[in-house]
Amino acid sequence: MSGRTHARARPERMCVGCRERAAKGDLLRIVAIEDACVPDHRGTLPGRGAYVHPALVCLDLAVRRRAFPRALRRRGPLDTAEVRLALEVKQA
């Protein structure tokens, strides 16, 4: 046997804020459009994506570590106001 299980595999991604692995469905995908980070709730926007837990703590860690430009392969800082607003609305 090849070591594969018959159960369906759940894809995992790493949160760019806290750097913990989690199921893809438990994380929020972020994409860069021009010079801004945009939340991709449906996971259908084109381009490279970065994943973060839907919590302000992880977003703050990612911003402080400058993880979004590195993960999205962009130069310079990216505006995360739209992502912050989406997370604040979700938590309220």
Image: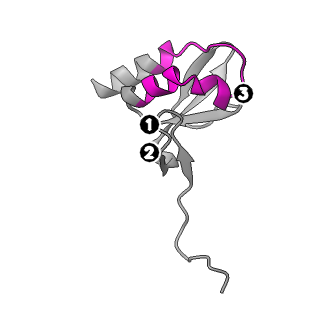
- Which of pointers 2 and 1 indicates the residue nearer the eye? 1
Report the residue marked by disc 2. Answer: 26
Horizontal side of residue 13 vs 48, given as left or right: left
Q: Position of residue 30 (x, y in %)?
A: 57, 29
Instruction: Check disc 1: other Cα within 10 Å, few if <14, some if 14-19, many if 20+.
Output: many
Residue at horizontal 34%, vertical 21%? 89
What element does badge 1 sit on?
A: loop
Distance, label 2 to label 1, CA atoms, is 7 Å
Report the quarter where the N terminus lies.
bottom right
Q: Residue at x 56, y 12 (%)?
A: 79
Q: Amino acid at mark 3?
A: Arg
Does 59 appear in magenta?
yes
Is 14 included in the stretch rendered in magenta? no
- Sequence order check, earlier mark of 2 and 1: 2
Give the residues in magenta.
Answer: 58-83
Q: Which mark is residue 73?
A: 3
* Position of residue 12 measured from the top left corner of the image (x, y, whole percent): 54, 52
Q: Earlier in the sequence, mark 1 or mark 3?
A: 1
